[in-house]
Image: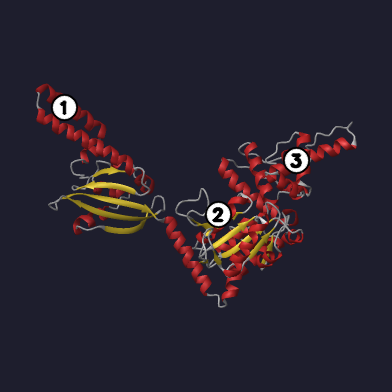
Amino acid sequence: MKFINQFDVMKNQSESVEIVKNLINKAHNDNNIEMISQFNDILSTISTVKNFNRLANCLYDGIHIVDADGVVVYLNDAFTRVTGFTQEIIGKHIDELISIGYIAEIAFEAIQTNNSYSIVRENANNKMTIATTATPIFEENRTLIGTIIIDRDITELINLEKNLANSKVHLKNLSDEQVKRENTYLELIKRNSYKGMIGTSDETLNVKKLIMKIAPHDTTVLITGETGTGKEIVANEIYMNSNRYENPFIKVNCAAIPANLIESELFGYEKGAFTGANISGKAGLFEIANSGTILLDEIGDMPIELQSKLLRVIQEKEVTRIGSIKPIKLNVRIIASTNCNLYKLAGEGKFRIDLYYRLNLFPITIPPLRERKEDIKILTKHFLNIFNAKYDKSIRFEDEQYDLLANYEWPGNTRELENIVERITIISNKNNVINNDTIESILGIVNLNIKKDMGLKEKVEELEKLELKKALEIGRSTRKAAEILKINQSNVVRKAIKYGIKLYDA
């Protein structure tokens, strides 16, 4: 796009369109075909300039254009944001703008040297650090037609570089590498800047220490804990602090894949291996995770007949696709997680004991939230920050509300706490301080439909109904609800039907 023929259009597009339309009408009246064609070309140019303007206003970087005479002819919205100069400077010579902070020598330097010229400077008005590049624009015969100047806000980048430099100096002063790593990690925990498992209780700190000890090694890890305790968060932290963090991290929910598909999903298959198979075959998730890490979530729900093949994959470090006899070598770190007692399942014949021992090489058990109540306040504040931002609220709790939360048993653990905080944020007014009644009502602490004339059986049924409903909301399935309530799944189904409670599955 050549700017020289369009600078006047840039200055006043609407006026230019009206002028050209009037000239076209006159040319029509004079039956001047050649002039009509030329004016139509000018209208096309104006349309191109409009499109350029729309595109330029989508850019993050500020752009303005100075013509060969040193007059500002164009600027986009980002230029105003970065520099503070508005459309009022269009049509003014850059010498006139020096008194209000315009850096004229940037454009002059590019024009005088016939080359791009760049500087980094601080905007005195808004304190932004700006990287500015001026580039002269020429006709084909090297006649100067103008200069395009691009301004980029690099304030955040400069701050990050300063922080990084400070961190490097700090780390360099620590002589012992292991002490350096652990001390830095513990300091991050104290500052609450650790972005993984949140909390400062002894139980949480112990889990974090285990994560940092095992993460650099390729050892198989078994993460156990109740539903909602944050097993996937722990797996993520192991991966992010491992030597494989730049390689694939494949997560497999063994409970979510149908039993008749899980083998082909994990180990892959050759073309024509079975009816309906992809004609070119398919790589399994273990292959896709090669050189990286695979998380086998809900490993306790893996079909018993498939566990022997998984055991072979772990032992031999190779996988064979369905329909193939050629093994594929693997270099995969395995992390498994479950809310089940695998040793107990093995005793019941539902889980291979040899697979259990292979997976249980480095166990990490996440305590339930009721055993680390010190973390409830910091977790609640963390979730409040998230949901206040999400719903444009300013909700806050007082100390007595935190006490109420700490006295609750949290059968759904951290996930239940997160859901409760989000629900409170949604139903509250924009700047509410939450009252006790709201928390008690949502937690069901006093929100029981119990009347004075009820007998003991009726009161027990009312409490049972409430607890069943909460367990189903947290677990989202009858199986998970049964685990939370520590009863048989069939009892959950029967009681839910009795009380008319929605079932998420059978």
Residue at 64% across, 51% down? 255
Earlier in the chain: of badge 1 and badge 3, it is 1
| Quadrant position of the N terminus in the picture | top left
* Nearer-the-camera pick, 242 or 316: 316
Dot placed on the residue nearer the N-terminal end, 2 or 3: 2
Q: Is 41 displayed left or right of 180 in the figure?
A: left
Q: Report the amino acid beneath label 3.
A: Val
Q: Residue at x 83, y 34 (%)?
A: 450
**Quarter-of-image position of residue 428:** top right
Q: Nearer the viewer, residue 497 or 22?
A: 497
Q: CA distance from mark 1 to mark 3?
A: 80 Å
Q: Which residue is mark 2?
A: 265
- Which type of secondary structure does the marked residue at label 1 adopt? helix
SS at badge 2: helix
Left or right side of 190 for 438: right
The disc at residue 24 is 1
Check if mark 2's residue and mark 3's residue have beta carbons within 8 Å: no
In whole angstroms, how far apart are the C-alphas of marks 2 and 3? Answer: 31 Å
Q: Which mark is residue 493?
A: 3
Tags 1 and 2 touching, CB below 8 Å:
no
Tag 1: amino acid = Ile
> In the rendering, at what x and y percent does residue 321 appear?
53, 60
Three-letter amino acid code at the position of disc 2: Glu
Number of other residues with Cα within 10 Å of mark 1, as a class: few under 14, some 14 to 19, many 20 or more: many
